[in-house]
Structures are given as C-alpha cells and as structure tokens.
C-alpha cells in the first residue's frame, strides 16, 4: 500500500511513490563500503533512502527530478528516519507531475488564492485596487508562479504554496493590528502587505528549491520593487489611467523597508505607520511558523524540547504535550 512519507511507521516494510530530490555516493571510512544516499520527497515531506547493494551502478541509472515507486524497510538511525532499499525495488514512473511530489502547504492552494482575491476586493481605493488586479488577476503567468512559489529556502514556508500562505498570514495580521490604530491607512496597509514579497516569484526556483541567479545577485526586495514600479509605470501609460505619486511612494517604501533593519537586508527602515506594521506582521508570521514547525517535529519524535531554532537565536521551545498527563516527576 502506497502511503504519504510522514504517515509511515518505523520498523515496517513500506512502499512509496516519491520524487528523487538529491542523490550522492558515500564511502564509509570505517568499513570502506559504498552506499547511495537519496533524498526522497512527496507532498507530505522528505525522507532519506539508502541503497547498499551495487550502489554505484544504481546511482548511474537514477535521475534527479524523476518519480520512482520504492519499497524498503523504514527505520530510525541517529534520530534520522530512513528507508533501506534493495536495487530491484526502485521502479521509475513516467508521466508524473513533479509538483505533486514536492512538499506543499497543508492548506488548499486554490482556496487560499480565492481568499487573496477576496482581500483585493476589500481595498476601496481605485488606484490601489486597480494595481492589485493588474498584478494578481490580469497577469496570469505571474499568478500561476505566485501560487507555486515558496516563501523561503530554509526559515519559513519553504514549500509549494508557501509564499501564498505567508502573504495571507501577513495581511490578516496587518488587518487585526489596523483595527486597533484608526489612523492607519487600511487600503495602503493591505496593498503593501499583498505586494511585499512578490519578488520571491523571481528569487526562488521551486525545484530544486534554491535561489535563482537573480535571487542571489539582487534579492527579492529589489526584484519586488522593480516589478511593482514597472507595473505602476505601465498603468500610468494607459489612456485615462493615473497613479498618485504619494501612493506609489507609500507602496514602494513598504516593499523596500519590510525587513525592518539595514542589517536585515532592507535598504531603508520603516518610516510610515503602515510600513512599521507590515514589518512586524512579517516577523510575527515567519517566527511563529518556525516555532510551530519545530514543535511538530518534537511531537513526532516525542521530545520535550525542540531543536534549536536558528532564526530565533537558537532558542529551544518547550513541548508540554510530550509529557505524560499528571506526571509531576517529569518536572
């Protein structure tokens, strides 16, 4: 029976359909043995696969980016789950959509996209509403890429649909904060929040998950600034269409300043109330995702404490659900 990677139980014979993400021949210094190590992926997550028999010949016959049906024995070694596979139990599957085998948001992507379009309708200002429709609705190629894009390589929402998920979280946090501060320009805040990370569509490659040359050399802040500035200029060139300079500056400032500090990659710091709220909303979601992701890992492993979280000063978070109920001695 073929099952999702994260649902597999240890010490059992398993069968999975998985995308080959990475492969590498390793040599043991102790035994001088050769093994093939593979990173295998489906929509639920990734797992290591290992082949000891005839490893070099098997390696030559496998291709990264192809989908395989794999059978093997699942176990845990040094706290790492892995499937021990024999060469005869690796079968290539053709005509498979690799996006179906990449880790993805737990939320339905089309449902999230519908929510994003609903947020655009919340914006009442015709200039900002028109800009959002011009980017997210009229540009279908961009919309398709935005739906698939990850929000990062490592630190938060690093999977298919991650950018869309993160953007919705940030907008929703901004809207909650806007209720408490009546002087906030709500339309500007929502517009800036929807657009703050659009450059990530160009910064990241979905598979293999890595930065593009543009992403490495320019970064998503510069890429997003250029993208939105170009769209505003295009709108201005259309007959009967204008775009107020003060709104342009407000939106572009939010894109440029949303990392909050110069040392965090922002060329300017937040200098409007909307930019400041956006920065903190962005931080809240990225940090909370890291915390809950590590808590899920700790829960699966039955650990009381998470691993150290790099983007939270290597803090380890407490997972009380791993303790036995009423077990005072555990404290």
Image: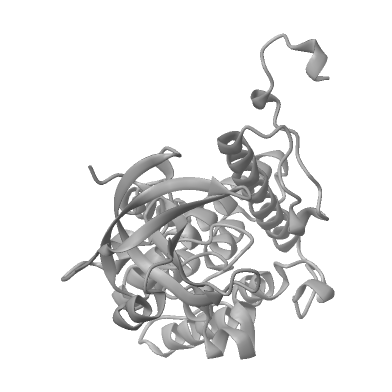
State the residue lying farthest toward the top: 326
Q: Considering only vertical position in the picture, is 69 above or below 57?
A: above
Image coordinates of residue 33 in percent, x first then y, are: 53, 72
Coordinates of residue 15 in the picture (x, y in percent): 28, 49
In this rendering, position of residue 314 left or right of residue 295: right
Is 15 located above or below residue 137 in the figure? Answer: above
Q: Nearer the viewer, residue 32 or 230?
A: 32
Give the camera-side residue of 210 and 276. Answer: 210
Residue 148 falls in image quadrant: bottom left
For the point 79% across and 19% down, the residue is 330
- Quarter holding the N terminus is top left
The quadrant the C terminus occupies is top right
| Colouring scheme applied when the structure was drawn | one colour
**Residue drawn where x is 66% and y is 46% of the image:** 288
Where is residue 108? Give x, y as percent: 35, 48
Residue 111, percent across and down? 33, 48
Nearer to us in this view, 20 or 33:
33
Q: Residue at x 40, y 60 (%)?
A: 41
Can residue 104 be seen in the rendering of this structure? no
Drawn side of residue 11 relative to residue 31, left or right: left
Q: How many marks?
A: 0
Res. 300 visible in picture: yes
Q: Is residue 211 above or below residue 269?
A: below
- Which residue extends farthest front? 31
């Amino acid at each position: 029976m073929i099952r999702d990677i994260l649902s597999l139980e240890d010490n059992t014979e398993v069968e999975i359909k998985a995308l080959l993400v990475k492969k590498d021949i390793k040599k043991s210094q102790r035994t001088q043995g050769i093994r093939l190590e593979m990173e295998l992926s489906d929509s639920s997550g990734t797992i290591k696969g290992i082949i000891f028999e005839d490893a070099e010949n098997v390696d030559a016959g496998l291709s990264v980016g192809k989908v395989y049906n794999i059978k093997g024995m699942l176990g845990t070694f040094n706290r790492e789950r892995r499937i021990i596979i024999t060469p005869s139990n690796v079968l290539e599957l053709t005509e498979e959509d690799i996006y179906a085998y990449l880790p993805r948001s737990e939320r339905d992507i089309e449902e999230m996209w519908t929510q994003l379009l609903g947020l655009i309708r919340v914006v009442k200002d015709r200039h900002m509403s028109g800009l959002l429709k011009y980017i997210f609705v009229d540009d279908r190629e961009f919309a398709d890429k935005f739906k698939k894009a990850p929000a990062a390589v490592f630190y938060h929402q690093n999977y298919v649909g991650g950018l869309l998920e993160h953007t919705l979280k940030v907008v929703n946090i901004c809207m909650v904060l806007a209720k408490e501060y009546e002087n906030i320009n709500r339309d500007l805040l929502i517009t800036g929040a929807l657009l703050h990370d659009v450059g990530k569509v160009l910064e990241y490659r979905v598979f293999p998950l890595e930065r593009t040359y543009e992403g490495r050399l320019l970064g998503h802040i510069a890429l997003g600034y250029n993208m939105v500035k170009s769209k505003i200029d295009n709108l201005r060139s259309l007959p009967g269409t204008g775009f107020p300079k003060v709104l342009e500056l407000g939106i572009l400032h939010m894109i440029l300043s949303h990392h909050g500090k110069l040392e965090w990659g922002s060329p300017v710091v937040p200098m409007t109330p909307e930019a400041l709220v956006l920065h903190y909303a962005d931080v809240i979601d990225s940090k909370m995702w890291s915390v809950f992701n590590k808590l899920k890992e700790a829960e699966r492993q039955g650990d009381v404490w998470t691993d150290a979280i790099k983007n939270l000063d290597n803090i380890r978070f407490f997972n009380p659900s791993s303790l036995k109920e009423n077990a005072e001695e555990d404290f």
